[in-house]
Amino acid sequence: MPDVLSAPLVVEFPFTRSLGPVQSAFLTGLRERTVLGVRTGDGKVLVPPVEYDPVTAEELRELTEVATTGTVTTWAWNPAPRRDQPLAAPFAWVLVKLDGADTALLHALDAPGPEAVNTGMRVRIRWAPQRTGAITDIACFEPYEGEVTAESTPHSGEFADPVTGIVTPARLDYTYAPGRAQSAYLNALTEQRTVGERCPSCRKVYVPPRGACPTCGVATAEQVEVGPRGTVTTYCIVNIKAKNAMNDAIEVPYVYAHIALDGADLALHGRIGGIPYDQVRMGLRVEPVWTEGGRHPDHYRPTGEPDADYDAYKELL
């Protein structure tokens, strides 16, 4: 039995959003060591604040300041902090109802161990030394011996130089293990070959293979080598440079295309090179270009053949 392939994969992108008046005031307040909530029509104070009442959908704008101390309502111990979590040492995730608030805020509690944490314990905010207008301006919570002393007070929400937008990185780390069909596909790529699998029912050849026909729902096993040449079925022009090492050397604009390899019944995607971006077209005949040691084609370039007739690839659009 061949070795099972596996590889660590990361999906990561920056999520950029603009802030309305409520979220802008909340995050700017954190920068200024002020915690703001919003008051609902029935008098409840929501922290973190939201722009619309979760019960009535009424627009909310009445900001109110709450204390930086509060009470733990529930918690869970985190014995092995992960990348980019608030604390590097083991800590507790806690829901804290700040004094003057009616809802709880999720954050980290710095505690020596789970035996030091309990529901109902009093805590206070530990502010980050450098604050920029983000939830990370709260470095964590820490134990506090004081009693409930503060009530919420109205606040205008006005600050100098308010935060109007944030960039939040989203990241997913996981280990990918391809099945039999994709393992064969990946192993063939190391030999600069492309293989798919043919459905025993409809006879379509799928590249990359999936181990089953998505149309007929039956298992596939018959391997078929396709390409290496193919036809551009459709494409897009990329004008924004991606922020990753793989694309650092690729200058924009460039073209990413769906390419139907000869003998395949499913188009795969690849970058088109060796031709000005504004000369790429549907029906263009292309071939792969491999780099030394590469495990997949670096890009596809024109073969010089006449363009394929539209009827030859229209079913693959």
Image (spheres, helix red, strand yellow):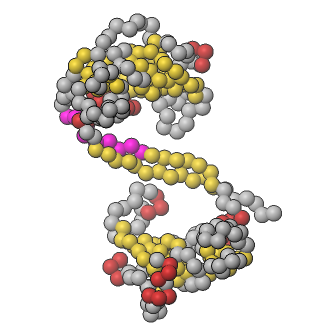
Residue 164: horizontal and vertical position, in percent?
Answer: 25, 40
Q: Is residue 122 left or right of residue 264?
A: left
Q: Residue furthest right?
A: 1
In the depicted structure, whether residue 68 falls above or below residue 7: above
User: Given the current orientation, which residue lies at the most extreme front position?
Assistant: 56
In the displayed image of the protein, which residue is found farthest to the bottom? Answer: 306
The residue at 62%/51% (across/down) is: 175
Q: Nearer the viewer, residue 134 or 290?
A: 134
Residue 172 on image: x %, y %: 52, 47
Q: Is residue 168 found inside the magenta-colored segment of the image?
A: yes
> Could you tell me residue 124's position as x and y percent?
41, 16
Tell me which residue sits at (42%, 77%) in the image: 234
63 or 254, which lies in front?
A: 63
Left or right relative to 46: residue 71 = right
Q: Which residues are magenta?
A: 161-169
**Where residue 128 appears, x then y in whole percent?**
38, 26
Quarter of image, res 148 = top left
From what the image shows, is residue 64 above or below residue 206?
A: above
Q: Is residue 136 visible?
A: yes
**Residue drawn at (73%, 72%) of the image:** 221
